[in-house]
């Protein structure tokens, strides 16, 4: 780019040449100068006019600033209203979750006394600087969420904090109920209420009878299932193998510990398929029918013992999937016989 400069009093013309780079730099410098000038004018004139209340300029500045503030407030109000709707939906869901938690805890058998600590209000610091370390309990609050027409940010923060606290409490409550349900299911699996052998033929039941060897009245401490030698014997419940020893009257005797002082015995077996210390589950093959020990023929002598006292196995087998063990034990306790541990 070339610029020709002429003057009437001069005989020659001066020519000034600019490259593209020089022209770009000149334009950039001009723009920068204009920006600095406009900033200086705004800072020293408009802001000063707004502060000192100049007649015309201050009103223009106030209109611009007021419009910007109104737009920002409108944007924030729309966002706060949307957040309030979401908070209302979350609290409605929390109410449903609370009702579901109450039903689940009822099914789990959780007592109201167990929930007093969980549902009690959290301790809050007592007011005043001299009350460090002292706490006072705040009264409980609750109820459905009714959103305000124009909630503030502080109100939304308080609502969100309350939702977070309720969610943590509901989570703890459901976890507690889950543990109770698992405990109930585990106890059901540990109670011998399934038949140890696939046979409906009962030789002798629990109670007094005439002993086949002495022909005298004696207590039969178990339930006899008639079956052929070699018939598979199943664990009546899950537990740990207590012993697999030989007994002069029981013959090959298997004992399984089910916890809470409850033990099952499988006597007169021809073979034992597990060893002491093994963990067995309900329905697992553990032995085979035989006629060892004090026995008149092939059968399984099945016993249930609670705290060392023989019980009627028929009551356990007929009690269903999860009988109440303490109450059942109290109803079926009988005196320990003075004679030998078992007959046949």
Image (tube, rainbow, N blue to C red):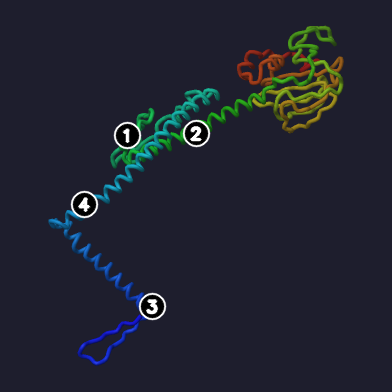
Between 266 and 160, the residue placed more toward the observer is 160
Q: Work out whether mark 2 precedes mark 1 in sequence or the reverse, and give the earlier one.
A: 1
**How far apart in space, not on screen, are marks 1 and 4 (Cα)?**
31 Å
Q: Secondary structure at mark 1?
A: loop
N-terminal-most mark, 2 or 4: 4
Crowding around mark 3 (Cα neighbors within 10 Å: few <14, some 14 to 19, many 20+) is few
Crowd rating for badge 4 (residues with CA inside 10 Å; few <14, some 14–19, many 20+) = few
Q: Is residue 332 left or right of residue 135?
A: right
Between 195 and 134, which is closer to the camera in this rendering?
195
Give the farthest residue toward the bottom: 11
- Name the disc covering residue 63, or none: 4
Whichever of labels 3 and 1 marks the residue nearer the N terminus, that label is: 3
> How far apart in space, not on screen, are marks 2 and 4 (Cα)?
55 Å
In the picture of the structure, the residue carrying the numbered disc 3 is: 21
* Marks 1 and 4 close (CB-CB < 8 Å): no
Whole-percent x, y for residue 115 in the image: 47, 27
Q: CA distance from mark 3 to mark 1?
A: 62 Å
Nearer the observer, 216 or 114: 114
């Amino acid at each position: 780019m070339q610029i020709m400069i002429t003057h009437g009093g001069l005989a020659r013309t001066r020519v000034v040449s600019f490259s593209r780079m020089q022209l770009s730099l000149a334009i950039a410098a001009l723009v920068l100068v204009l920006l600095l000038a406009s900033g200086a004018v705004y800072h020293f004139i408009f802001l000063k006019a707004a502060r000192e209340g100049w007649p015309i300029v201050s009103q223009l500045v106030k209109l611009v600033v007021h419009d910007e503030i109104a737009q920002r407030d409108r944007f924030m109000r729309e966002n706060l209203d949307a957040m309030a709707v979401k908070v209302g939906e979350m609290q409605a869901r929390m109410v449903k979750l609370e009702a579901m938690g109450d039903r689940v805890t009822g099914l789990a058998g959780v007592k109201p006394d167990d929930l007093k600590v969980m549902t009690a209000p959290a301790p809050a610091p007592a007011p005043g600087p001299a009350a460090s370390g002292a706490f006072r309990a705040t009264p409980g609050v609750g109820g459905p969420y009714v959103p305000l027409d124009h909630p503030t940010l502080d109100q939304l923060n308080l609502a969100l904090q309350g939702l977070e606290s309720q969610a943590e409490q509901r989570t703890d409550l459901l976890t507690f109920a889950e543990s109770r349900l698992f405990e109930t299911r585990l106890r059901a699996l540990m109670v011998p209420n399934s038949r140890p052998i696939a046979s409906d033929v009962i030789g002798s039941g629990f109670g007094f009878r005439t002993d086949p060897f002495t022909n005298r009245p004696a207590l039969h401490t178990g339930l006899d299932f008639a079956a052929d030698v070699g018939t598979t014997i199943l664990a009546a419940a899950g537990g740990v193998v207590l012993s697999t020893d030989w007994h002069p009257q029981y013959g090959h005797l298997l004992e399984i510990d089910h916890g809470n002082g409850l033990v099952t015995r499988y006597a007169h077996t021809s073979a034992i398929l597990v060893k002491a210390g093994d963990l067995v589950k309900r329905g697992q093959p553990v032995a085979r029918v035989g006629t060892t020990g004090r026995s008149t023929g092939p059968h399984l002598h099945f016993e249930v013992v609670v705290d060392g006292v023989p019980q009627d196995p028929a009551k356990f087998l007929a009690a269903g999937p999860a009988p109440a063990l303490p109450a059942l034990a109290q109803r079926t306790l009988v005196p320990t016989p003075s004679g030998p541990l078992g007959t046949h």
